[in-house]
Image (cartoon, grey):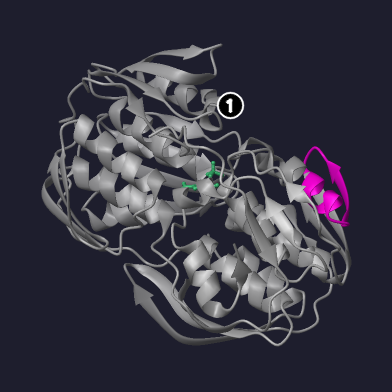
Amino acid sequence: MSHSTQPQPMTARRSGPLKGNALVPGDKSVSHRALILGALAVGETRITGLLESQDVIDTARAMEAFGASVERLGPGEWRVQGVGVGGFSSPETVIDCGNSGTGVRLIMGAMATTPITATFTGDASLSRRPMRRITGPLGLFGAQVTAREGEFLPVTIQGAADPLPLRYRTPVASAQIKSAVLLAGLNAPGETVVIEAEPTRDHTERMLAGFGATIRTEVTDEGHVITLTGRPELRPCAVAVPRDPSSAAFPVAAALIVPGSEIRVEGVSRNPTRDGLYHVLAEMGADLTWENDRIEGGEPVADLTVRHGPLHGVTVPAERAASMIDEFPILSVIAAFAEGSTVMNGVAELRVKESDRIDAMARGLEANGGRVEETRDSLTVHGTGGLKGGATVATHLDHRIAMSFLVAGLVSERPITVDDAGPIATSFPDFVALMRSLGAELG
Ligand code: S3P
């Protein structure tokens, strides 16, 4: 659903120590994939712990539009009656993916090798994001694509009637490109191969294997080579969605920078394709205690206790960017409260997220007394142990920019206001309630 609601400004004020248990919601990436693979399986998939945020609801509606039946049974509990690989039918309406790049890109892949036609649209943020990175490889499968200015939504795809399997090297580290190609490869005969120079989040591969597809990943001289055998019959299965490490990063950051804080976050992902932030925080000197390592929903997780303490700046190597791509906005805030400079390298992809996140973070930090430097593909934050605050930040319809500055305002000298907290509902609908329950002053 595209959001036409009025902006909802929100202010964060200096807060006392944060204490308690932070139960963050289900993983957004895993939630989208559970709905899409459920729709492509033959029969009934049960999902528990689904993230019920706007992005994911938009994907659920889209799966219905392609012919699956999707039903909410209770909080986080959903049933998907799938139509099988190649079983999608042409939707009667335009598919509106709202704010979600993951939703639109994965769904385009999932329909592009079936002889149906669909038109995709989204909100103002999504309509500015590049789509050729997806429609290009989908065209190589044989799909016919038209896009505004060849690149942007609305995009119409006529799926290939006689798809060819693809061997594709991703031009940038992107799980969305990888996943779109793999989902398209499901309905192509033979083997579809995706080659990544740097590994990106591997939820699609893990879940495809769980649904019975034949898929393997090898590390070779070329990089990570993922090979999927096309035309499987996907078996419905029970998907238990783990908690979202990218959402966990916000209360974790708040506890690290608000003096006297100690919080516990249960079930934080230890998946090496998602846990880059936690390595950086350890290098910065953060007080992190991990316990109860286990597997939940097919993903390695552990419980994390975080205590406030002094932090120092570090250099984040480019090779680590993919494993923490959504965590750079909140890392920039943490870096402003550390002593010394934090250099984030190889982050050009941040310029094409829900907003240009390098620009949004740099401008927001500067307005609140921070010192930053940016290049096309790097961001440096010169930490001074604090932020003055007092300014209103432009969030550009970007949930993670909004949450990052609301965390910053909990410890800046003067309050920080974000111009629109509405988009937080795209990934973390209970963010404000959860942060308040820990003691954060948000209003
Ligand atoms: C996602 C992949 C990432 C990430 C996004 C979710 C996914 O994007 O930024 O929030 O679920 O595949 P890219 O793979 O394009 O970097």
Which region of the structure is painted magenta? 362-377
Image spot of residue 189 (x, y percent): 25, 29
Image spot of residue 275 (x, y percent): 57, 66
Is residue 151 shown left or right of residue 319?
left
Residue type at the position of mark 1: Arg
Quarter of the figure that contains the N terminus: top left
Q: Count the marks.
A: 1
Which residue is nearer to you in this view: 283 or 393?
A: 393
* Residue ID at (54%, 72%): 436
Residue 346 visible from this viewpoint: no
Which residue is nearer to you in this view: 141 or 11?
A: 11
Q: Would residue 389 be counted in the magenta stretch?
A: no
Image spot of residue 328 (x, y percent): 68, 55
Is residue 77 shown left or right of residue 402?
left
* Residue ID at (22%, 23%): 91
Which residue is nearer to you in this view: 289 or 186?
A: 289
Q: Would residue 368 be counted in the magenta stretch?
A: yes
Indicate the quadrant where residue 374 lies. top right
* Residue ID at (73%, 52%): 318
Q: Which residue is mark 1?
A: 128
Dot 1 alpha-carbon crowd within 10 angstroms: few under 14, some 14 to 19, many 20 or more: some
Compared to 164, does 423 lie above or below? Answer: below
Compared to 268, does 116 lie above or below? Answer: above
Residue 399 visible from this viewpoint: yes
